[in-house]
Image (cartoon, helix red, strand yellow):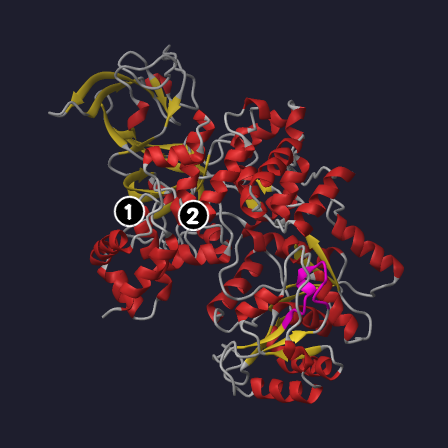
Amino acid sequence: MSKKKDFLRTVVENDLQSGKYKEIVTRFPPEPNGFPHIGHAKSISINFGIARDYHGHCNLRMDDTNPTKEDTKYVAALENAVKWLGFDWGEDLYFTSDYFSQIHAYAIKLIKMGKAYVDSLTEEQIREYRGTVTEAGKRSKYANRTVEENLDLFERMKNGEFSDGEHVLRAKIDMSAANMKMRDPLLYRIRNVNHFRAGNEWAIYPMYDFAHCLSDYIEGVSHSICTLEFENNRDIYNWVLDTLELQPPRPYQYEFARLNINYTVMSKRKLLELVEGNYVSGWDDPRLPTIAGYKRRGYTPESILTFCDQIGIAKANSMVDVAQLEFCIRDDLNKKVPRVMCVLDPLKVTIENYEGFEEIDAPYYPHDVPKDGSRKLPFSKEIFIQRDDFEENPPKGYFRLTPNQAVRLRHAYIISCKEIIKDENGKIIEIKAEYYPDSKSGSADTSGVKVKSAIQWVSATDAKEVEIRLYDRLFKNEIPEGIEDLNPDSLKIIKNALVEPAIVKEKPDERFQFERIGYFYTDPIDYSDDTPVFNQIVGLKDSWGKKTKEKKVQPKAQAKQVQIDGEVVAMSKEEEALFDKYTKELQLNSEVANTLARDKKLSDFFEEALMEYNNPVNIANIVTNEVARELKQKELTDLKFIPQQVAQLVKMIDDETISTKIAKDVFETMSKSGEEPKQIVDSRGLLQISDPDIIAPIIEDIIVKNPDNVEKFRAGNKKLLGFFVGQVLKETGGKANPKVVNELVAKKLSEK
């Protein structure tokens, strides 16, 4: 049983005690349209964990209701992720497509009850008729069709007699409902495409809201656990099951806060853009937050599950620091992996007074006495040390090797510098040194030489050359928007690094701590006898552990919602009222609404900006990101800009005067100078470029420079459109109008 009693487990226990259910059945229901990421890991750990804790079972169900995006490779990736994390669904592997006939029968029942109708409005008309937050919607004239007409049309839809979008099946509920999701939601749409499991048997496919609740009911699920973005969908979930008068026990939906990590994107659309646009090497690129990426990088299942346990299960969304995840893997590996030596940037050292050769017995776990294990370190006259472990003119506080300061070679002897050899350009290429025979580690040191540090080294004749891949954040911004925020230095490859010979093996699957550098893993794909490849898992610096200590001595840090170790501060009644207003009236997403509601400075700023210009979603995004960053160390009165200026900035984006990317630069200037947004844009020439005559030559140049991607696009890889659009935006410094660029790029690429 989990040590923490979260609200979901409280619900489960109450349901068991009341006799509502005899057995707990949960489900993990991903759509197989991408590789699972760490957000899915949280959902997996919750659903499988609750089933395990209460002696029930968890179904793995593929929500394969959209045949245009789904593939068997994604099914395999999802299965592999669940297994790798240590969970087992046993015989309970299902697909929503298993229930297509039953779901179809339920749809026919709703039609016969007068609770569903075939609508023939266009997609634009449906959107227009839905109304707004403050205005009721308008029901389609097609809602007056008879039951017989609806049954006939629905059957013909199923048989493939109509084109995509020509008709849809809708529930007949309430076009004036406060929850806009209940304004006659769609139940089925036409898709004349092949399904990867059902083939061409169906030309209609159920919508998520219709298929999900019925699949749960068919499988006997007791607790349907979803993330907060499905909170408003719960009303549809209940309406379908209640209207069909399905026999109990029936499932109920509960929502928890989804996982958001800074410097990371977890949108499937954005991850797919990174993969299809070749910004990363694939779904298992170690920089991605996918389970496959973490696995290839060297993360352990235990570290990810510990992370999910630490952040807890909350009802309000919050942003988790990626450093907390790094702390979990570092803490896990620190107890497990052997310590070895690696030199990333070799500098040759010749020990002139050493002759011969010896093997030094060195422990793998020098600071953990109970652990066994050691290796033989070859030691010879010529060795390599890390280049920055020697300084000819050292700064104050430098304790490594210098012309006047000796240093210890880890597990070996003390050496001192006697001569510096440089090439014709003045670069140091070799150090002549001497060693002290009586200074060997592990024996009585009678050399009398005092040193303040030890450095890593490898024997020149025995070291193995390896490829080291050093990883940094994939995005340079804490809350990235997309490819424009990619960190160009997220991957650094070192081809001529040197390691101890003992760690290079034929069939590797090992993790090591390279002393004073970080934790590394043998790459499971690219590692070979000719080129051993090691991926950096995480550095040695424990930044998150330091952060949590700072927070404990600074109580003010708890004023704003922060989720650490699963602790979440409850909202006050006033904050709850604001949260409801922001989500229900202004249609803000839960994460943004939560941030605003809990921070009076931000909510005051937001409300004032909204009085200037009515675009709550876009204003809220800037306030909770850019403005919030400024207010971390300041009061509202200390800001150089005012809410009205932020509102004006949003209006300029809406009017397409400037692009979203340029808006960030304008805000940066505005926050420092207090200038009006329009003045900044005019003085710096930042107006958005929408003239096709200016954009077209840039597109032409990029197409000429990327013939391979042009060929792939024309061969059918339409996802590369995003690559070309991104290149144009980059070339124009973000000033090109994305809509115009999209149209022109698509037109140009379609030309033969």
Could you tell me residue 170's position as x and y percent?
65, 74
Secondary structure, mark 1, is helix
Secondary structure, mark 2, is loop
Could you tell me residue 118's position as x and y percent?
63, 80
Could you tell me residue 258's position as x and y percent?
62, 50
Amino acid type of the residue tagged 2 in the rendering: Arg
| Magenta highlight: main SS | loop
The residue at which mark 2 appears reads as 287
Task: Provide the residue span drawn in magenta.
Answer: 174-186
Does residue 356 appear in the picture of this structure?
A: no
Asked whether 317 or 135 is in front, the reply is: 135
Relative to 438, does residue 53 appear above or below in the rendering?
A: below
Q: Is residue 670 left or right of residue 497?
A: right
- Name the image quarter holding the C terminus: bottom left
The residue lying furthest to the right in this view is 18
- What residue appears at the point 74 percent right and 55 percent down from the top-left corner? 53
- What residue appears at the point 65 percent right and 81 percent down from the top-left corner? 104
